[in-house]
Image (cartoon, rainbow, N blue to C red):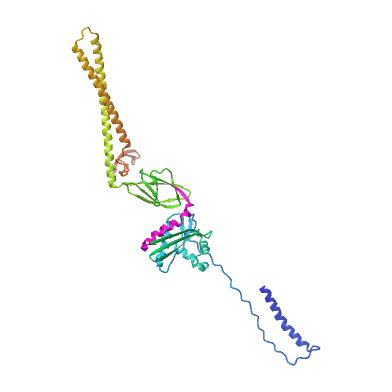
Amino acid sequence: MKRLLLLILAALLLAGPADAAKKKKGGKKKGRPAKTSVQKREPYKPLPTIPEQPRIVESPPPPQPEVFVDTQKLKLMTVRFSGSSNVDPVLVDGLTQTVSEALAQMGPFAVASSTDVQRVVEHAAMRQMLGCSDPSCLAEIGTASGADYLVTGSLTLAGDVYVLQLQLLRVDAARVDGRVSRPYQGGTDGLFPEATAAAKLLVRDVLAERQGQLAIIVNEEGASISIDGSLIGVSPLGAPVTLAEGAHRLEVEKQGFIVSREDVMVEREKQLAHTVTLLPSDEWKRDYTNHARFVRRAAYVTLGTGIAALGGGAALYFVGRQKADALNRDIEAYNGGDVRPASVQDDLDKRERTVATIDVLTLVAAGVGVACVTTSIVLWSRGDDPDRYEIVPSTRVVRSSPPLRLVSGRSELGTQTLGFQLRF
């Protein structure tokens, strides 16, 4: 269109001088009076050109944060929190950093650093959004950075009460998926633990959709198991625990043992096993060892007593059988004789009572022996191992070659020789 307009203007300019020359050549025309004065022609002025519109050059998108590249984690960006006029900006920046670090330590999130956030916000295409707070406006910032979620917040001070508010924005839907408000009264140092707790509450519903299982194995029975401050059971646990993806605080405690506190990681749609080894305190270990050794000694003593009683009972049984056989032979002889003296009858009665006493002692010894052996077995199997908590250093046997050994070779003449080699 522009070119066509320029062609038309050029044609008009060329046609104007040609017509004037024709009129000058032809002279006067019929029916028209001749002009007495010649009109001066104005000098040629070039037509104004239409200024070109400046080209709109699209600025390149901001660089994506390094933590967002080639990661399967949820991409999260924390925008600097705002603060009321009576709040120190340094405190606001510190709380922003604390929330970012708390979310990064949870595991499922790849959190962009404050430098990455500033680079995106200060980008030429985003300068008009520096003061935006609308979810759709913030979503554009998140889209430009490649983030899945944005975390914004504010800190206000009313009197001596701080109010920390956090907001979780889902970028693709431009909607708020979580809000947390926590009032706090006290020194500024206590605000940082509050910010950490608020960050965990903020993403609780998001992580609830990404769950895994954790099987907890404890070396001691009857130990209390807590996860993130909540008691979940006593060891041994019957089944794995279903938890949200990410890091969790595991605490295992039992009376007399040192409390175990550690962070465990749960992966999405996976079942992981974690073993906890509780270590006893010195006092409890000493009492345990003394009691276990006493029970073990009692098992040895009862076992020895039982074996001795069984041995004595066996001896009494053989002695009693011999005496009973002899008594039966004498009784048969006494009954078969023609003369039966009273003294012999008294002796036989006395021997019969002795055999009966031996039989009773045999039964008692056998009973005591069985009871002692049974008790020893129970004490041994049910009793504790005195060396259970003793740390035995591992040793390695190094086999060295003998200092003196027989070697063979050949002499200068080519004959086979034998000799001894001494090694120091």
The residue depicted at 27 percent of the width and 34 percent of the height is 300
| Main SS of residues in magenta | helix
Side (left or right) of 175 relative to 295: right
* Residue 285 visible in the current orientation: yes
Q: Quadrant of the N terminus?
A: bottom right
Residue 364 falls inside the magenta stretch: no
- What is the span of residues highlighted in magenta in the rendered image? 185-214
When asked about the image quadrant of residue 24, the answer is bottom right
Compared with 239, 44 (above or below) is below
Q: Decide: is 48 above or below 148.
A: below
Quadrant position of the C terminus in the picture: top left
Horizontal side, residue 156 vs residue 16: left or right: left
Q: Nearer the viewer, residue 175 or 261?
A: 175
Q: Position of residue 372 (x, y in %)?
A: 28, 31
**Is residue 207 found inside the magenta-colored segment of the image?**
yes
Instruction: Give the image location of residue 270, x and y in percent.
Output: 47, 48
- Image spot of residue 66 (x, y percent): 47, 60
Q: Is residue 412 shown above or below 323?
A: below
